[in-house]
Amino acid sequence: MKLSRSGELVLLDNIRKKLGKRKKSVLTGIGDDAAVLKADRRKLVTTTDMMLEGVHFDLRLTTPRQLGFKLVSVNVSDVYAMGAEPAFVLLGIAVPGDTDGKFIDEFLIGVEDACSKYKVSVVGGDVSASRKHMALSATLMGYANTTIQRSGAKVGQGIYVTGTLGDSSCGLGLLKKIGRPVNLARPLNKPLKWSTMKPLIQRHLMPLARKPGVWSKKATAMIDISDGLLIDLRRLCAESKRGARIYADSIPISRELKAAAESMRRDPLEFALSGGEDYELLFTSNAKGTIRGATRIGEITRSGTVLVLSDGTEKRFGSEGYQHFK
Amino acid sequence: MKLSRSGELVLLDNIRKKLGKRKKSVLTGIGDDAAVLKADRRKLVTTTDMMLEGVHFDLRLTTPRQLGFKLVSVNVSDVYAMGAEPAFVLLGIAVPGDTDGKFIDEFLIGVEDACSKYKVSVVGGDVSASRKHMALSATLMGYANTTIQRSGAKVGQGIYVTGTLGDSSCGLGLLKKIGRPVNLARPLNKPLKWSTMKPLIQRHLMPLARKPGVWSKKATAMIDISDGLLIDLRRLCAESKRGARIYADSIPISRELKAAAESMRRDPLEFALSGGEDYELLFTSNAKGTIRGATRIGEITRSGTVLVLSDGTEKRFGSEGYQHFK
């Protein structure tokens, strides 16, 4: 049934039934003017992100379920990047009146999948019609005793990243070649082998927010990598009023990205430096040795942001990362 | 300067400067992955609302400053409707790349005006490009020791509303006749006298969220009137699993609405019953006498929702209020 027939109230009721499960700390959930949550002794950490059709997602390349999952993940990533524990989410869903109810059902399953994964409860939201394109928003709330700002980096501290970088943007490139939504449970062997493509495409469509490890107790500054390593490192440096020197050879690149980039005749480093939406963590630390679950890629300097290439040449970089308006 | 030239980062910096003022309870505000707020002993009350161009607002009829003010007000209204005190707001702003920077400046002044009025701090948000239409969102957070749900109404309790109803939707009707944005500081005497039009138009463009009075300590259920008296009363009744009987003659209608409706040859009651966006409070109470700052319009019954007209005839009503998808 189309939304224009079933109406907003039916949709709200549907959401309430589907996402009604809630923690004990949720005193009033979906269905009142606002959600009411038990007091918590820790600091409240909160963030919001919008996802707009045609800007942040393309319905020709994603399923509604993947979209719902990603909406929650990208916001959880910001809460993790503060060293906090996610707890609640508010949703904003605006879709054209001719959207099929099935689309919304699938979208909500994706939201629910992510909420289970991150132990987050949907506590409320707002549903309305949009004119042409979908507009989605999510606000995440979490708690922490101690948080990790972007501004705490000091000269000489190591710069670290979790996971591998560039996978998501390479995955998007592959998706564009495929040209239609991909069911991740159904192997596809074009243009590349499924074992190469799957982790890259999955990283783009259903990114997993990176939970900080025990190392986070020693992190002095932290940010999540949403717009690409270079731009997000620049942000961390700007807030800390410091510079950085990173080494191209140290940047963690997955086997799959190497294989895919080779067949696309692209430099995998390009994806890793400027590709967005990896949702890995970038942090600084005084640690001397290696940090389990992270890779050291450089160190904090007095000023300037420099990339040292394999041959030893140094390249200054600005905010070449993805900027929405440029 | 157009946003596409100045870029997202400049806009973010601009917002940070303009809305950077913050309470002591804001430990980390705009400029990190998420906001960090001091722990509070009270319950956390939170709500989100989206406002979309072409659905919730028309840039041919509103100034950016009025828009910014309203975005905050409608969310504060939901927090007030829980009997809570608003404290923090997160913004989501998505505008087309060719939006003039001056538009954003004015919009932020409106946001700031409202934040000062309600003693709310902007603690973060998200800025991005939209394809064609603007999409705005706000998430309000507040605190309360005790909250007032929609579900607490009992048979025999009185039904009350604050202020007067229908002004906002009549104001929208007038605005449509005027056909362009109205500067509320510049009197206009067409189609009606300014003294009649101003309060109605102002109520639509820059609604003031209604702060609950001391009576709220005795309120058993409460909701804000955003979609019209009938639909919002139905919501309160549905949550309380009760009915209602209200009296047409008791519904508070302003002098200005009466005058404007007469000249438009419309029944003012129609605006008061079904017009949305008044942002007054509807509540139930055991109080026997009158309640200062509110008008008794009826009482809670076992079931069914009934409007008693001036001549004594009874009219059952459903959810005739505004529904976005219908």
Image (cartoon, coloured by chain):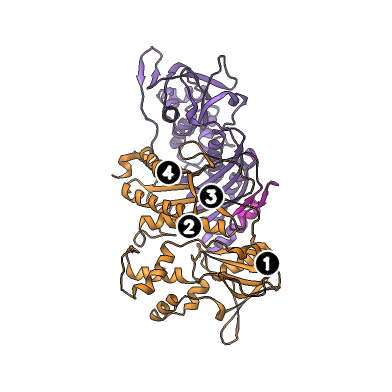
Chain colours: A purple, B orange
Give residue A274's position: percent from left, percent from top.
41, 29
Residue furthest left as drawn: B1
Whole-number angstrom distance, CA of label 4 to CA of label 2: 20 Å
* Helix, strand or loop under label 2: helix
Determine the secondary structure under disc 4: strand
Figure quadrant of residue A117: top right
Label 2 environment density (alpha carbons within 10 Å; few <14, some 14–19, many ≥20): many
**Left or right of A267, for residue A9:** right
Read off the magenta span.
Answer: A13-41
Q: Earlier in the sequence, mark 1 or mark 3?
A: 3
Q: Name the N-terminal-most of marks 1 and 2.
A: 2
Tag on residue B127?
A: 4
The answer to whether B131 appears left or right of B279 in the picture is: left
Question: Please, which chain is the residue tagged with disc 1 on?
Answer: B
Q: Is residue B20 above or below residue B265?
A: above
Residue type, mark 3 in image: Ala
Which mark, residue B153? Answer: 1
Q: CA distance from mark 1 to mark 2?
A: 26 Å
Inspect the image, locate mark 1, and give the three-letter code of the amino acid beneath it. Ala
Badge 4: chain ID: B
Q: Which residue is mark 2?
A: B73
Question: Could you tell me which secondary element the residue under label 1 belongs to?
Answer: loop
Q: Are marks 1 and 3 in contact (CB under 8 Å)?
A: no
- Which mark is nearer the camera, 1 or 3? 3
Q: Name the residue rendered at 46%, 35% in the picture.
A: A172
Give x and y (percent) for residue B285. 66, 69
Residue A189's x, y, as percent?
52, 31
Image quadrant in which you'd find residue A140:
top right
Q: Nearer the viewer, mark 4 or mark 2?
A: 2
User: Which residue is denoted by mark 3 in the rendering?
Assistant: B87
